[in-house]
Image: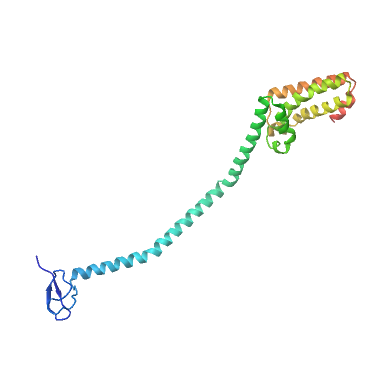
């Protein structure tokens, strides 16, 4: 194997490459002028230059891809109307909660709690499509006994007051819009119709027919 030689820049002597840094003849620092080392240095310089010059390109590519991703995300949000759907989902959860509150009170026959929802907090619970369903249920629980008491006491004013409440609630059903916007229950609807019919017969027997129909004009 041919031994590599280094040339001393001081005396020009050829010195075998034995990993010595100085010329053994004149003591001058040696310089490796071999082609292999020169090529290696050239490749190293080119590599560093290539990596350095590629940084702005990589950064620009990253920025471009990021902007494109943001644009596509924005386009998807607009196309699928995501904010409105999120808002609608939130509103649906709220109305479901309101309906659930009233349903639980009704099923437990907790009429005081149902009155709280329907009367004291009506501005909130009106947001539920089941509001009038449970209000009718509460009316049916509360007013028929009071109507009968007023009838026995011949308290015409109280009878008319209660009849107006029940009749107005029933007459709401005459509009088809009611059934397309609000929840209903067949049992409650039948009970309401039957109660209004019963009170109407009693009012007629009591000679209050004119006053009764004035309330329903």
How many circles with numbers are drawn on the protein?
A: 0
Indicate the position of residue 59 as horizontal and vertical percent values.
42, 61
Q: Height in image: 169 above or below 11?
A: above
Q: Closer to the camera, 142 or 192?
A: 142
Q: Closer to the camera, 61 or 80?
A: 61
Instruction: Specify the color scheme.
Output: rainbow
Image point 23% across, 67% down: which residue? 40
Indicate the position of residue 206 as horizontal and vertical percent values.
89, 19
Image point 60% across, 45% down: which residue? 84
Indicate the position of residue 213 as horizontal and vertical percent values.
86, 27
Q: Is residue 170 left or right of residue 46?
A: right
Q: Is residue 162 left or right of residue 99?
A: right
Q: Is residue 90 left or right of residue 199?
A: left
Q: Is residue 186 visible?
A: yes
Indicate the position of residue 60 as horizontal and vertical percent values.
43, 62
Query: Farthest residue toward the bottom?
Result: 11
**Which quadrant of the view contains residue 39?**
bottom left
Image point 53% across, 52% down: which residue? 74
Q: Is residue 81 visible?
A: no
Where's the C terminus, which quadrant? top right
**Which quadrant of the view contains residue 88?**
top right
Q: Is residue 199 left or right of residue 188?
A: right
Query: Farthest residue toward the left?
Result: 1
Where's the N terminus, which quadrant? bottom left
């Amino acid at each position: 194997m041919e031994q590599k030689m280094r040339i001393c820049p001081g005396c020009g002597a050829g010195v075998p490459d034995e990993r010595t840094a100085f010329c053994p003849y004149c003591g001058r620092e040696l310089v490796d002028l071999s082609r292999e080392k020169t090529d290696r240095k050239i490749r190293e310089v080119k590599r560093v230059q290539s990596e350095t010059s590629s940084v702005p390109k990589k950064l620009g590519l990253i920025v471009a891809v990021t902007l494109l991703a943001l644009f596509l995300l924005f386009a998807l949000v607009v196309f699928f109307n995501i904010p409105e759907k999120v808002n609608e989902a939130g509103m649906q959860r709220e109305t479901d909660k309101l309906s659930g509150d009233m349903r639980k009170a009704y099923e437990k026959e907790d009429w005081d709690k149902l009155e709280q929802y329907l009367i004291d907090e009506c501005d909130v619970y009106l947001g539920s499509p089941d509001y009038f369903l449970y209000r009718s249920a509460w009316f049916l629980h509360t007013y028929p006994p009071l109507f009968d008491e007023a009838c026995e006491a011949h308290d015409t004013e109280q009878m008319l007051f209660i009849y107006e409440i029940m009749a107005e609630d029933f007459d709401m059903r005459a509009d088809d819009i009611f059934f397309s916007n609000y929840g209903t229950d067949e049992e409650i609807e039948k009970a309401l119709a039957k109660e209004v019919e019963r009170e109407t017969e009693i009012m007629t027997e009591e000679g209050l027919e004119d006053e009764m129909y004035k309330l329903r004009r």
